Amino acid sequence: MPRLRVLQPGVADDCAPLIQKALDEVAAAGGGEVVLPPGDWPYRGALTVGGGTVLRGSAGTRLLALDPRRSAVCLRGRFPAVRDLLLDGRATRRSSAGDAAGFRLLRAEEAELDRVRVTRTAAAGIFVQETVGFRITHSTVHGCLADGFHVTAASRYGQILGCRSYDNGDDLFALVGYASNGAPVEHMVIADNIGRNGAARGITCLGARHVAITGNLIHGSAAAGIYLHQETSYDTFAPSWVVVSGNVLRDVARKASHAGLFIGGGRGAQPLKAGGTLSNAIEQVVLSGNLLDGSGHDGLYVSSRARRVTGSGNVVRNVRQGAIRIDSREASVEAVAE
C-alpha cells in the first residue's frame, strides 16, 4: 500500500484543500494511505475519504474544524478507513445535519474506524448512514452535543467494539431505524463498550433487528441504561431478535420516568421499501446475565406489547421504585431483586 505524507502541520490556515487533494490522488491511484503527522490540522468544510483509502494520524494528530456546521470526515465507497485521529468539532450549538458530525460513514461498504477520538461536534460524534459492513473499534466520543454513536438509514452488518462514549448531549449509543428509510437497521453488535454520563439513554435500540448488546458498562444516564422500543413520535420500526446479555447498568434513569432496563412495544406495522410490512411488536428478545445497580425509577420493565421475551440470571438492586415489572403475557424472564 503506497504512503503519502501530506504536509507538515501549521503550514496553512486551512489544510482542507491539501488533505483532500492527497486523499483524491491516493484513491485515484487505486488506494493507499494519507498520513498526517502529529500537530494541529485546521480545516474548513467536510473531508471525504474514498474507497480503498486510509487516513491515518498518530498520537498528537488533531483535526480542528474551522466551521462546526461542516466538520464531518466522510467515509464513502468500498474499504475506506480512518485510524489514530482526534477530531475536534469546536461546536457550541447542536445540529442534526450529517455534515456537522465527526466521522460520518455514508453509503460505504466495509468501512473501518480504529482508535479515533471525537469531541465537541454539533451532530453525532460518529454517524453511520446507509452503510453495509462497518467496524468501529477502540474509539472515543465525548463532549459532543448530540448522540455519541448513531447508526441509522437501513445500515447493516456493523460492529461497535471496545469504544467509549461519555458526556454527550443525547444517547451514548443509538441504533435507529426510521420507517421513512424503508428498512430497519440490521445485524449489529454493540459489545464491550463503556458509556458514562449520558444526557439521555445509554444504549438505544429503536427499529433494529438481529442485534447483540453484550458486555457493555453504562455508568450514569438521564434515561434508561438500555432502551428497546418502537417510538411513534419518531416513526421508527420496532426492534426484534435482540440479545441483551452480560451488561452492567449503574446509576441510570436519573431523570426519566421509566425503567433502567426498558423493553417497550408498539402497534400495527410499518411498510418496507422492498414490499410488504414489518410488525411494530417488539419480539424475540433475550435478557440474560445483566446487572442493574441503581435506577432513579423502575428497574427492569417488559411491556405488555412485547412478545417472546426470555432470559435468566438478571439482577436488579438499588432502585427507587419497582424493581421488576413484567407486563407481557409472552415473557419468561428470570430476574432477582436484591
Image: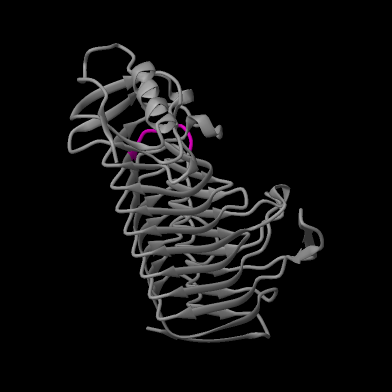
- Residue 243, given in percent of the width and then of the height, sits at 50, 74
- Residue 136, given in percent of the width and then of the height, sits at 38, 52
Q: Image point 65% across, 58% down: which residue?
A: 184
Q: Quadrant of the C terminus?
A: bottom left
- Residue 292, given in percent of the width and then of the height, sits at 39, 72
Q: Relative to 102, is 304 on the left or the right?
A: right
Asked whether residue 130 is drawn in magenta, I would say: no
Asked whether residue 120 is drawn in magenta, I would say: yes
Q: Image point 59% across, 47% down: which residue?
A: 130
Q: Which residues are magenta?
A: 118-123
Q: Quadrant of the N terminus?
A: top left
Of 111 and 170, the residue lying toward us? 111
- Residue 63, given in percent of the width and then of the height, sits at 30, 28
User: Which quadrant of the structure image shows residue 248?
Assistant: bottom left
Q: Main secondary structure of the magenta part?
A: loop
Say how many tags the image has. Answer: 0
Of 231 and 159, the residue lying toward us? 159
User: Which quadrant of the structure image shows residue 49?
Assistant: top left
Q: Relative to 176, is 42 on the left or the right?
A: left
User: Which quadrant of the structure image shows residue 330?
Assistant: bottom right
Q: Image point 18% across, 33% down: which residue?
A: 60
Q: Against 91, is 292 above or below? A: below
Of 128 and 255, the residue lying toward us? 128
